[in-house]
Image (cartoon, rainbow, N blue to C red):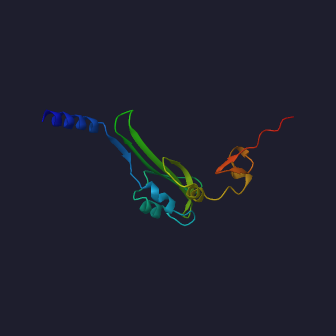
Amino acid sequence: MRYLKALAMSGMLALGGCVASGHNFDAGRLSTLTPGQSTLAQAAQAMAAAPAHIYPQSDGTTLALWQFNLTFVPDGLYSRKEALLQFGPDGRLMRLVDSTNVLLEPWERQKLLGPAPASMADLPYGAAPQARGDVYVAPPAATQ
């Protein structure tokens, strides 16, 4: 009997440090979204949660962040997952901007990343359009 009381007490102490933030979402359903078609409402419905944060941008687009953090023991055991999606001025999904601890097949990730940038101005740091996977790399500097 004392063993059960001790076990119950240690369980209560462990759960006392449990903290959750954000909205738990179904990250596996992210791959059901289609750039150019899916809306923010459809994304929220597919992932079974509203985004934790919505960030309107000056160019008319919107960034929506699905985020869920669960800490069992402070600075010890924790779980984190995030998905940041960009929606166009028309309200339709443009692309997956970033994700953390969201497992996607390579073809699913490529579909969600959207098309490659159309012009040199869209590339980061003036990089040349040399694609390696889903990352654009700047060519090595010319030596003289």
In-image side of 46 versus 17 (left or right):
right
Task: Please state which of residues 111 and 4 is positioned toward the viewer in this rendering.
Answer: 4
Q: Residue furthest right?
A: 144
Image quadrant of residue 95?
bottom right
In-image side of 76 versus 97 (left or right):
left
Q: Residue at x 58, y 58 (%)?
A: 107
Quarter of the image with the C terminus in it: top right
Residue 70 position within the rendered picture, expressed as x and y whole percent measured from the top left:
37, 43
Residue 64 position within the rendered picture, expressed as x and y whole percent measured from the top left:
49, 53
In-image side of 8 versus 58 (left or right):
left
Residue 1 position within the rendered picture, expressed as x and y whole percent measured from the top left:
12, 36
Q: Is residue 115 above or below residue 98?
A: below
Q: Residue at x 21, y 36 (%)?
A: 7
Q: Residue at x 82, y 38 (%)?
A: 142
Q: Residue furthest bottom?
A: 37
Residue 53 position within the rendered picture, expressed as x and y whole percent measured from the top left:
45, 50
Q: Residue at x 73, y 44 (%)?
A: 138
Image quadrant of residue 48?
bottom left
In-image side of 135 versus 54 (left or right):
right
Q: Residue furthest left?
A: 1
Q: Is residue 82 above or below residue 48?
A: above
Total marks shown come to: 0
